[in-house]
Amino acid sequence: MCLFEKAHHGESGFSPQSQVLSPQSMLRVMLGPNSYGKSGIRLVKLRRREDRDDLMDLTVSVRFEGEFTPAHVAGENAEILPTDTMKNTVYALAKDHPLADIESFGLELARHFLVGNPQVSRVSVAIEEHPWERLTVRERPHAHAFRRAGEETRVAAVTRTREAATVEAGVEGLLLLKSRQSAFSGFRRDPYTTLKETRDRVLATSVTARWLYSGTDVAFSTVGRGVRQTLLETFADHDSESVQHTLYAMGQRVLERHAEVEEIRLSLPNKHHLSVDLSPFGLENRNEIFVATEEPFGLIEATVKRSP
Amino acid sequence: MCLFEKAHHGESGFSPQSQVLSPQSMLRVMLGPNSYGKSGIRLVKLRRREDRDDLMDLTVSVRFEGEFTPAHVAGENAEILPTDTMKNTVYALAKDHPLADIESFGLELARHFLVGNPQVSRVSVAIEEHPWERLTVRERPHAHAFRRAGEETRVAAVTRTREAATVEAGVEGLLLLKSRQSAFSGFRRDPYTTLKETRDRVLATSVTARWLYSGTDVAFSTVGRGVRQTLLETFADHDSESVQHTLYAMGQRVLERHAEVEEIRLSLPNKHHLSVDLSPFGLENRNEIFVATEEPFGLIEATVKRSP
Amino acid sequence: MCLFEKAHHGESGFSPQSQVLSPQSMLRVMLGPNSYGKSGIRLVKLRRREDRDDLMDLTVSVRFEGEFTPAHVAGENAEILPTDTMKNTVYALAKDHPLADIESFGLELARHFLVGNPQVSRVSVAIEEHPWERLTVRERPHAHAFRRAGEETRVAAVTRTREAATVEAGVEGLLLLKSRQSAFSGFRRDPYTTLKETRDRVLATSVTARWLYSGTDVAFSTVGRGVRQTLLETFADHDSESVQHTLYAMGQRVLERHAEVEEIRLSLPNKHHLSVDLSPFGLENRNEIFVATEEPFGLIEATVKRSP
Amino acid sequence: MCLFEKAHHGESGFSPQSQVLSPQSMLRVMLGPNSYGKSGIRLVKLRRREDRDDLMDLTVSVRFEGEFTPAHVAGENAEILPTDTMKNTVYALAKDHPLADIESFGLELARHFLVGNPQVSRVSVAIEEHPWERLTVRERPHAHAFRRAGEETRVAAVTRTREAATVEAGVEGLLLLKSRQSAFSGFRRDPYTTLKETRDRVLATSVTARWLYSGTDVAFSTVGRGVRQTLLETFADHDSESVQHTLYAMGQRVLERHAEVEEIRLSLPNKHHLSVDLSPFGLENRNEIFVATEEPFGLIEATVKRSP
């Protein structure tokens, strides 16, 4: 989670600001962008059908922006809905919501909070979906037993004001590796450059992608699966000259194929796999033996969007 | 990793002990069970074929037991092969080893170290295999692009002395959940018992299993996959009266189906999913809405083995 | 780390954008805000004195923004200085830099990169300092043996363009708890509110603070220590009506006491400590026995700044 | 936590075993060593004094061994006290226990469970104590505001049967580094050895120590602090020829100075700090600039004990 994302949002002009006198020093100090909410709300919903159960495993966070100056400056809580209430609301609304996709649940949560809280000008709801898949037993999907299918999560981030709603979707923790079609050469050099050029390297990354939908009336699950598959296929097929090169190709292809997507931000750490020097042992390493490293790592980030 | 596993091994009589006088105090102090080695050796091997690459992603650790009293007591390192050398050896031997399974690579590493190091009486090699799967592109498996397939790992633990070798295999981080066929009732009560009996609860766990093979000449990959599938199927199908009950059924079935397995140890944390009380909001929660908790957790552990 | 902080920066207008035609589809797609760099550069520097060593333990990250369209769109790397070079530069410049504080090292690194790279318009350097303290042996500080002093880190974030430089400093991972002088009452209620009002609760948080200096000519270490102490003292002394109330008091006091600070952003998770109901066991819990929880948690964030 | 520590304990003969027929296959399968319990019980206790509060922050785990065959084999829970009850008991007993040290609380918990549960033959209680220190405000310790003092934990492990009780104490996560008086030379070499000998290296480790007391009537807090200080001082002062050499010296000194300690097990990962080659940049690195690495790491473990 991005601790200060809000602050940046706020600096774009969305958040209320107020000014107070600090009596002791007569220095004038004021409240800038601010928000509060509940994070880490763990929700598992079972949809009970006659012959089988469906499982949804989510982590939800809710955040309010609005007019909260009295709480900060004077300790007056009359306009503060407790974060405990946010948590209760997530569980209560999950009961009757179909939860067909996390985006629509986020939109509903944000709508609910705006309706009941005039002091709130903007509600942000972020939802992570943790994937489970049915166990295969005797070659058939089991009715009510599941296996957690990895650390990759689907995410949705809904932001709603009284004027507008935006929906972003994404994936996180999607680890990819390609063992061919990746090069890095012809780069700029300076006196501190020792890296060798290569036309054949391992490229590994953990994809964080976040895309903005053009509206709120989208077949979120279908389109989301499609965007993810486009990311995977482009990563696999691209003749990569650099992480930047592959990142841009991934974003470009998503925009070309998925008309519902306005822009996409990609964050691709370069998880370096270093070829091991086996020559001291009389062995030649023809790009077969690597050490996978965690630190340091390259970090390549960009937004790809439609031209105005 | 189990920091003091070695100590317990050692107490069974495997480790050398020596006795020295502590001159200052005349108290007699001695070296007890001891070992040293290298952990966290990250190895990725690509097997280059004409039309595609295979990928193996391992974390290896190596541990020596033997006669190391002079190093401890007198700072004499003549019998200490550096742990850096252990690391080099893992990379060098990986070059030509087929790596068809991690158990045979562990056996080969242990053999190599015993042959070259008379001062060593026992070598332990533990290998974790991190799963990757080929990307599916245009509905076909891709030749050289992969996705990390979750946090579940396959493990092998080889221990070799000059007299014998034992091979254990296992799985770790296998998260399972069943939403029916799980109860917990009829349990013992005391004045601190407030838990309600239930005939219908969510049962979730992260399986750690370790099984001992009866020999070293086993089709490790095939049998290992079979054991894992037996664990999954038994978990899914069992009418569970408790975690203990399901654990025993899982172990029993493995021994019944897989003659190569001598015994199996299972560690099953009970990852509690608590039903949320929605009655304050006028809603009835018919075991649909749960909060998934991390702490505290039950922990159920047992060995199931063949009768002598 | 904030994956998309850059994107938000970029949206404020700092990043170059370029427009390309996607030939296949004739859809017009363009590169938006983008950056690249190296993260997780682990640097330990020993300053060797005659009678003792000083220790500095840092994690550095470097990020470039500039004109990188050809790399993304065409795979042309001529303007891409490798991230490996960034890493080398950090180690090389650390050799002769006094490292009296992390802010001045960050400024120097950013200056160096801007001078040598006309294609770069903005360099961001973030440095975390991991604290160590000398061991006390025979009641005196030891000359060259150290203990890691916790998980709290000091951070600096320098951003430099050809026109200006800004320096932010901060602390992260500072866990605080107060067992009196904390209340939460008089709050807004709705039908999902079940929280009880309290005039006496445990307040625990992990402080993340980031403050902006008014210039680059500041006694960073001295002022930084002062700001941290002001945060601690205000947290301890404040009669808290809410996390918001305490957060604002902390920020206000920093601005009052430290003229070098322009604004401060605070992120305070509310790490809930729940009073345990012991009444089923005939015991009264007078706010003595608590369960410390990790999830869910409140999250309160705000900026406090000087009035224009 | 050591998942299979129990199994090893059990193999020493403590655990009950029972034999059942598996009707389907007529293979004879039996229950081996087994245990169950609750882990991750998070307990914060405030001791309210007139003018100040004392704070104790613990993580407790409880484990039972005994006659649990019917639960495993037949799903009969009559002898299973729920782990939820263990949790309740920890909170309830903490209310009136002075908690002067974690060892005596562990002993009391184990005694309580044995008295009430004839089906249990052995109770193990492990307690971690998370350190907090009072904030210093206006140069005086504050009455009720605290700062978490790092990741180092004090641990106690009590094991109690109807015949005997043993108490172990320890420290975990104690990160130490010395920048002089550490060498590694004269070691064994083989064809895979490339490590250079050194008479001057950085030695860094994260100490895990566990010592066994000779009885249960010990001034646990005082002695525990003393043992920790002995470990620190010996680490600092020792002329180290290897990690093994320093480990043994630490253990030996503890036994010499602290008559209450029977034996001590130490686990010392070698957290490698690699000298960075600055020669490509025309700089000489006189052991000043290091990269701190996480993987791979050496791991040195040994027990030091009194001679019989």
Image (tube, coloured by chain):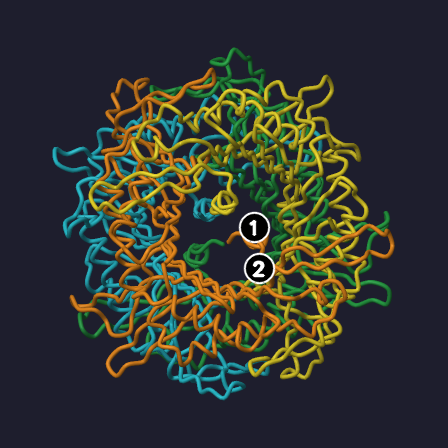
Chain colours: A green, B yellow, C cyan, D orange
- Give the answer, above or below, for where C277 lies relative to C93: below
Q: Position of residue A64 (x, y in %)?
A: 50, 68
Do the residues indicated by labels 2 and 1 lie within the same chain of the protein?
A: no
Query: Residue A104's quadrant in the figure?
Result: bottom right
Q: Which residue is mark 2?
A: A126
* Residue nearest the viewer, comparing B111 with D180: B111
From the viewer's perspective, tell me whether residue A296 is left or right of residue C193: left
Q: Residues within 10 Å of mark 2 (few under 14, many from 20)?
A: many
Query: In front: mark 2 or mark 1?
Result: 1
Q: Chain of mark 2?
A: A
Q: Position of residue C140 (x, y in %)?
A: 14, 49
* Residue nearest the viewer, comparing A10 with C108: C108
Helix, strand or loop at label 2? It is: strand
Residue at 58% x, 43% y: name it: A308
- Give the answer, above or below, for where C102 lies relative to D147: above
Q: Which residue is mark 1?
A: D8
- Give the answer, above or below, for where C280 lies relative to B126: below
Q: Position of residue B53 (x, y in %)?
A: 68, 24
From the viewer's perspective, tell me whether residue C74 is left or right of residue D265: right
Q: In the rendered structure, which amino acid carries the disc numbered 2?
A: Ala
User: Visible in this render: residue B114?
Assistant: yes
Query: Residue A13's quadrant in the figure?
Result: bottom left
> Are the residues flagged by discs 2 and 1 in contact, CB closer than 8 Å?
no
Query: Residue D290's quadrant in the figure?
Result: top left
Real-space CA distance between mark 2 and mark 1, rounded to the nearest whole angstrom: 45 Å
Q: In the rendered structure, which amino acid carries the disc numbered 1?
A: His
Q: Residues within 10 Å of mark 1 (few under 14, many from 20)?
A: some
Residue positioned most to the top: A282
